[in-house]
Amino acid sequence: MKKERKKITVAIQGIRGSFHEIAAVQYFKDSEIEVLPCDTFSELFTLLSDGRADFGIVAFENSVAGSILPNYELLRRSGLPVTGEICIRVRQNLVALPGQQLSDIREIHSHPMAIQQCSLFVNEMRQRGVKVVEAVDTALSARIISEEHHYGSGAIASSSAAGIYSLEILQKEIEDDSLNFTRFLIISGSATGADSIERQAGTDKAMVCFSLPHKVGSLSQVLSVLAFYQISLTKIQSLPIVGRPWEYMFHIDLIYSDYNRYRQALDAIRPLTEGLEIVGEFRHGLMPYETGIN
């Protein structure tokens, strides 16, 4: 008997054809998903907090544009757990209505992060007198051009969006770096949501956040303890603490092979930190250097 695919709701920033949708489909490939589009990340976290979505998928880092800092604060304030991650190759394209040439384009619309990922191409187009307009989503920019028949306008978007909205690719893979990847975190909206798909056995990665006493060597002490317990630190991100000038909240990503030893490491650094919290424990998504993707 064929196993029935479980149905879940997944909130994304953007619409059909966006990179968030592409990441959601890839990550939840074994489930039947209903995608809930959101204009902003703030709206996405509201859906999760209100229990209107089982999961949210949120971009946190791009290999060209760097970390998306506001999403760290949204995650911290939500108190919701991270249950997974996925890293996908992001190929950006200039798309427009059929029958046009690159020389016909007078405006380019897209999300600020996509524009930043394609800064070399965008700056070259600016020098030709092309206006660059920031928008809430890559795919939405493509859809508006298609539905409103904006000749002379192009969008930076995925090839999927070009196909969905009947646009042509005028120039493909315009990102600055051919190894342009975005890392997405999967956020659970509730305990029910987290249990609506089978948990992957054997977590080996965690996201932890904490602040530190404002004294010399406080961070190096934490890092030394983690090294002693052979815990691999793959990312550290600091964010200013509102109301406490020059003090910071640290978000760190840890990879471990022994869960008990990882927990011992946390117990060891807890007295050195303030307000240490485990944001999530999950199986780490393979990074490009681990998969050979190019």
Image (tube, rainbow, N blue to C red):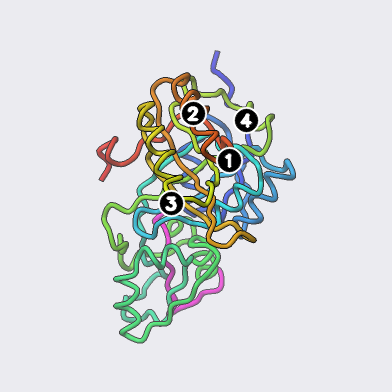
- Depth-wise, is mark 2 or mark 1 nearer the camera? 2
Looking at the rendering, the stretch of residues picked out in magenta corresponds to: 147-160
Considering the image in quadrants, where does the N terminus appear?
top right
Within 10 Å of disc 2 (Cα), the crowding (few <14, some 14-19, many 20+) is some
| Residue at the disc numbered 1 | 187
Q: CA distance from mark 4 to mark 3?
A: 23 Å
Image mark for residue 61: 3
Q: Nearer the viewer, residue 228 or 97?
A: 228
Q: CA distance from mark 3 to mark 2?
A: 29 Å
Dot 3 or dot 1: first in sequence order is: 3
Within 10 Å of disc 1 (Cα), the crowding (few <14, some 14-19, many 20+) is many
| Residue at the disc numbered 2 | 268
Q: Are marks 3 and 2 in contact (CB under 8 Å)?
A: no
Q: CA distance from mark 2 to mark 1?
A: 27 Å
| 77 up-or-down from 95: above or below | above
Amino acid type indicated by mark 1: Ile
